Image (cartoon, rainbow, N blue to C red):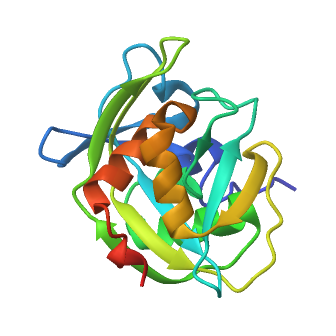
Amino acid sequence: MPVSPSPQSPVEEDLVVLVDDDGTPRGTAPRVGVHSTTTPLHLAFSCHLLDRDGRLLMTRRALVKRTWPGVWTNSYCGHPRPGEDVADAVRRYGRRELGVDVHDVRPVLPQFRYRAVDASGVVENEICPVFVARTDDALRPDPDEVAEHAWARVEDVWATVERAPWALSPWFVEQVAALGADPAAYR
């Protein structure tokens, strides 16, 4: 008896949305191959996750990550699937990368965009709205995504960005600068 195909193949599920300079979708590309020395502009997101005490989750990217392996950064990032609401992608990645359900998902930098080149020459080139969300769950990070993690007071994280920006991902440093000296978005 033949097996019917699943509604989406793994390749279809892992497509990124390519966009024009104004953010208009212009096609898709497989996520696995989109990041290179000539990465096209595409849609992504960053999430800053808070716990019950208002502490910010910082993560150290797994050493197997293609871009910025081993670098400390915001809680998690990802790519919405074609047609997927970005807030839904934030929830999906929270479960996938950290093993948690997230709630109170809200945009704090809806127009954030950046381009950065890591030491290996791989380019990040994203329209990347930034969200704040909360969780009440215990973390169960995927080791292929997260090498280490720490919950920290927002003020301490901001001080670290100011004093040692070289120790953090360039997108997170830019996000903190865009949020300003008083991280009121977290309250």
Q: Is residue 80 visible?
A: no
Q: Is residue 110 above or below residue 185?
A: above
Q: Position of residue 6 (x, y in %)?
A: 68, 58
Quadrant in which the N terminus appears = bottom right
Picture quadrant of residue 32: top right
Query: In the image as oriented, which residue stretches furthest toward the right?
Result: 1
Q: Nearer the viewer, residue 164 or 177?
A: 164
Q: Residue at x 45, y 72 (%)?
A: 132
Q: Position of residue 184 (x, y in %)?
A: 34, 77
Q: Residue at x 60, y 67 (%)?
A: 92
Q: Nearer the viewer, residue 25 or 162?
A: 162
Quadrant in which the C terminus appears = bottom left
Relative horizontal placement of residue 115, taking residue 186 as reference (left or right): left
Q: Nearer the viewer, residue 179 or 163?
A: 163
Picture quadrant of residue 54: bottom right
Q: Position of residue 108 (x, y in %)?
A: 32, 70
Relative horizontal placement of residue 148, taking residue 111 as reference (left or right): right
Relative horizontal placement of residue 143, taking residue 183 as reference (left or right): right
Q: Is residue 152 visible?
A: yes
Q: Is residue 35 above or below residue 108?
A: above
Picture quadrant of residue 51: bottom right
Relative horizontal placement of residue 5, taking residue 159 as reference (left or right): right
Q: Nearer the viewer, residue 108 or 179?
A: 179
Numbered-mark total? 0
Q: Is residue 26 above or below residue 47?
A: above
Q: Position of residue 102 (x, y in %)?
A: 60, 79
Q: Residue at x 41, y 49 (%)?
A: 44
